[in-house]
């Protein structure tokens, strides 16, 4: 069976991919949308090879940065990145954009699953909640309903660890069990630095996940 996964190179998407690899042939799609954290693209390329993806695409949708204007801290150079959750780090319908493009590829590949790394600790993000993915799944399949009925297209299911009630720390334990210390090569930081900062909201979530999993965090942070 084939699965198309939205693959950032972060801890969540890498652990999810390792988990799904037991049952699926993986096709990874990574988006360059104008994010400050360019290092995540390097991590995605590395893990796509480490996990032996059947195919990996890096898709440039950098034009989205100009559409987001100055509203978002992850793409606007002048907006500071917060150390805890703030709505300025919610990129408008980012997952809808990613999952729609991933689904288009899935229809072409005959893949029955499209997956992204949202987990139940992401509940503050509207486009990470299972209700959102269920509604999007219905809309996407409706958009290809005639092709699905004719047998030309295969219906897709959108899945996330959140739908399986998995937390970030639970997902981390699964990923570490399969990848070992390679997990420390994942990239979580929102900043542009060459080393994960250790202060942004995403780095703090990473630290918390290791603590909740009862694991030593050997990530190199700029600010320990």
Image (cartoon, grey):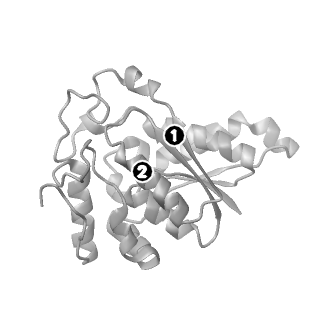
Which of pointers 1 and 2 indicates the residue nearer the eye? Answer: 2
The residue carrying pointer 2 sits among few (fewer than 14), some (14 to 19) or many (20 or more) residues within 10 Å by Cα, namely some
Relative to 137, residue 212 above or below: below
Dot 1: what SS?
Answer: helix
Task: Answer left or right for 11 relative to 138.
Answer: left
What is the x, y in percent for residue 177? 42, 79
The residue at 69%/55% (across/down) is: 112
What is the x, y in percent for residue 30? 50, 45
Of residue 134 and residue 154, the one placed in the foreground of this image is: 154
Of residue 75 and residue 167, the one placed in the foreground of this image is: 75
The residue carrying pointer 1 sits among few (fewer than 14), some (14 to 19) or many (20 or more) residues within 10 Å by Cα, namely many
When asked about the image quadrant of residue 185, the answer is bottom left
Which quadrant: the N terminus? bottom right
Residue projecting furthest to the left? 223
Asked whether the beta carbons under mark 1 and mark 2 sit within 8 Å of each other, the answer is: no
Relative to 80, residue 161 above or below: below
- Which residue lies under the disc numbered 2? 42
What is the x, y in percent for residue 124? 31, 47
Which quadrant: the C terminus? bottom left
Query: Can residue 163 be seen?
Result: no
What is the x, y in percent for residue 23? 63, 70
Relative to 66, residue 28 above or below: below
Q: Which mark is residue 98?
A: 1
Measured in 3D between alpha carbons, the distance from the residue under mark 1 to the one under mark 2, in whole angstroms, is: 18 Å
Dot 2: what SS?
Answer: helix
The residue at 29%/30% (across/down) is: 72
Task: Answer left or right for 118 relative to 27.
Answer: left
């Amino acid at each position: 069976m084939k699965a198309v996964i939205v693959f950032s190179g972060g801890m969540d998407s890498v652990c999810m991919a390792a988990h799904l690899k037991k049952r699926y042939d993986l096709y990874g799609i990574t988006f360059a949308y104008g994010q400050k954290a360019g290092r995540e693209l390097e991590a995605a390329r590395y893990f796509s090879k480490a996990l032996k993806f059947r195919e990996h695409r890096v898709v440039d949708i950098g034009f989205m940065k100009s559409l987001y204007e100055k509203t978002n801290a992850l793409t606007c150079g002048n907006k500071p990145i917060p150390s805890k959750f703030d709505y300025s780090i919610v990129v408008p319908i980012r997952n809808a954009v990613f999952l729609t493009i991933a689904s288009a590829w899935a229809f072409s590949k005959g893949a029955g699953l499209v997956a992204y790394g949202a987990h139940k600790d992401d509940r503050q993000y509207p486009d990470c909640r299972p209700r959102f993915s269920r509604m999007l799944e219905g809309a996407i399949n409706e958009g290809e309903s005639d092709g699905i009925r004719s047998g030309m297209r295969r219906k897709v299911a959108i899945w996330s660890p959140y739908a399986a009630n998995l937390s970030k720390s639970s997902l981390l334990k699964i990923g570490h069990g399969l990848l070992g210390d390679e997990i420390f090569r994942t990239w979580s930081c929102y900043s542009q630095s060459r080393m994960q900062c250790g202060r942004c909201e995403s780095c703090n979530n990473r630290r918390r996940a290791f603590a909740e999993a009862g694991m030593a965090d050997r990530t190199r942070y700029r600010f320990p």
